[in-house]
């Protein structure tokens, strides 16, 4: 995996802008509705080629496919695992899970204030009194071999002529998958989450075997705390540790230098007042056998948490990719601000152990594709300023 050996290198967390026509094809595909398969395959390849080119042009050193073949980081997994069924259930009175603690203090905001990704309408407006829920009813099995191979082939093709860049492909973590699937088959929660881990292992292996960096996406490691308001910090730490242990089981035998771990506190636009402090579970993050840890760090709720790393001895040959540009605002961060954030981390962790990154995937979370690419340019410029300060060049 690329490291900041003589300069601060630049990457990002995942999802990139998606044209509306491809979005519509993806929705039809994942919803089981009629769609033009040939048109879908063609547009996926075209869009991936375009976003790889734009990443390279904006100074990104470790690029990806923009997650263009995936409607969301979680919903795509439903197309790659067998052993569950969907049922319509009554959800009246059931609050949305990933901001359940915040909902107590901010019922007006979630009821009618703002939508999950900005704009008017209210988060509650996104939920009806009935919804399709997923239930595990038989042994889980991975059936996404063809799909992950398409992802691999499309990215390899897009990388031709992209220059000296490395590539990563994201895959969702077992603990995050568990949160949208209700267990009705396995005897215990532990058995269930380990079964998810074992089911996803072929995807993890395929990505690494193809020569790419595997990025494990685990947003629910952070925002899961909001989902269980009855838990104490100690209880949640124990709960989360089991999910990390299951992930590590799935990653067994995969070289650490081919793994990157990404976590955040959810990407919805909301108060985040009750997000769990990083210091309360940073020990679990560094327990993952990954060379790089990608952490949300640029927004106003979590920027101060660089201090949590002061009390952590980073294992040898590990790197941290703090978010130095965010997804909660369409404002373009100034390169000097980005450089200051990077230098701050470098002074704690060592300059060679820091990579510039984003809080989350910017594509679906900022106002327009133009904003994404300008944020990337600013991040590259900020990394260059930090390099000058840290290496004197």
Image (cartoon, grey):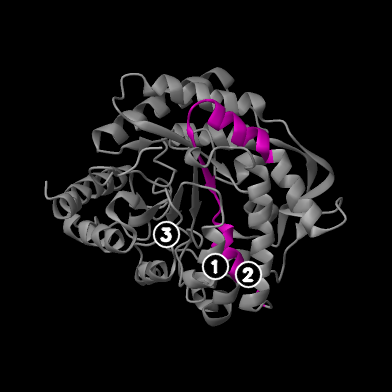
C-alpha separation, residue under disc 3 versus residue under disc 1: 14 Å
Asked whether the beta carbons under mark 2 and mark 3 sit within 8 Å of each other, the answer is: no
* Callout 1 crowding tier (Cα within 10 Å): few <14, some 14–19, many ≥20: many
Quarter of the rendering containing residue 300: bottom left
Q: Is residue 325 visible?
A: no
Q: Which mark is residue 237?
A: 2
First reached walking from the N terminus: tag 2 or tag 3: 2
Left-right relation of 295 to 125: left
Q: Position of residue 129 (x, y in %)?
A: 70, 62
* Callout 3 crowding tier (Cα within 10 Å): few <14, some 14–19, many ≥20: many
Q: Is residue 152 visible?
A: yes
Part of the protein shown in magenta: 200-229
C-alpha separation, residue under disc 2 versus residue under disc 1: 7 Å
Depicted 15 relative to depicted 159: above or below? below
Q: Which mark is residue 296?
A: 3
First reached walking from the N terminus: tag 2 or tag 1: 2
């Amino acid at each position: 995996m690329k490291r900041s050996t003589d300069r601060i290198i630049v990457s990002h967390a995942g999802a990139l802008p998606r044209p509306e026509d491809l979005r519509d094809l993806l929705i039809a595909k994942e919803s089981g509705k009629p769609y033009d398969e040939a048109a879908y395959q063609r547009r996926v390849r075209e869009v991936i080629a375009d976003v790889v080119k734009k990443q390279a042009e904006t100074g990104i050193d470790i690029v990806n496919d923009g997650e263009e073949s995936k409607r969301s980081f979680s919903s795509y997994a439903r197309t790659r695992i067998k052993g569950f069924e969907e049922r319509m259930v009554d959800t009246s009175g059931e609050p949305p899970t990933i901001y359940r603690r915040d909902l107590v203090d901010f019922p007006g905001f979630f009821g009618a204030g703002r939508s999950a990704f900005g704009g008017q309408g209210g988060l509650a407006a996104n939920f009806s009194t009935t919804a399709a829920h997923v239930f595990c009813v038989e042994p889980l099995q991975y059936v996404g071999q063809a799909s992950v191979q398409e992802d691999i082939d499309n990215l390899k093709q897009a990388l031709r002529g992209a220059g000296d860049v490395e590539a990563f492909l994201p895959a969702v973590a077992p603990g995050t998958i568990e949160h949208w699937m209700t267990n009705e088959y396995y005897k215990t929660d532990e058995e269930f989450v380990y079964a998810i881990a074992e089911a996803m292992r072929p995807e993890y292996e395929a990505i690494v075997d193809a020569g790419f960096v595997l990025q494990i996406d685990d947003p629910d490691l952070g925002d899961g705390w909001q989902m269980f308001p009855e838990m104490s910090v100690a209880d949640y730490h124990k709960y989360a540790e089991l999910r990390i242990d299951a992930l590590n089981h799935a990653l067994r035998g995969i070289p650490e230098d081919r793994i990157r771990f990404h976590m955040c506190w959810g990407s919805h636009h909301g108060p985040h007042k009750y997000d769990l402090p990083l210091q309360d579970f940073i020990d679990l993050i560094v327990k993952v056998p990954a060379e790089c840890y990608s952490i949300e760090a640029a927004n106003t709720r979590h920027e101060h948490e660089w201090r949590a790393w002061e009390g952590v001895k980073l294992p040898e040959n590990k790197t941290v990719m703090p978010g130095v540009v965010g997804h909660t605002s369409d404002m373009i961060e100034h390169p000097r601000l980005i450089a200051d954030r990077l230098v701050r981390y470098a002074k704690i962790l060592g300059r060679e152990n820091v990579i510039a990154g984003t809080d989350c995937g910017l594509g679906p979370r900022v106002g327009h594709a133009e904003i994404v690419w300008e944020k990337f340019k600013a991040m590259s410029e900020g990394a260059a300023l930090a390099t000058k300060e840290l290496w004197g060049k």
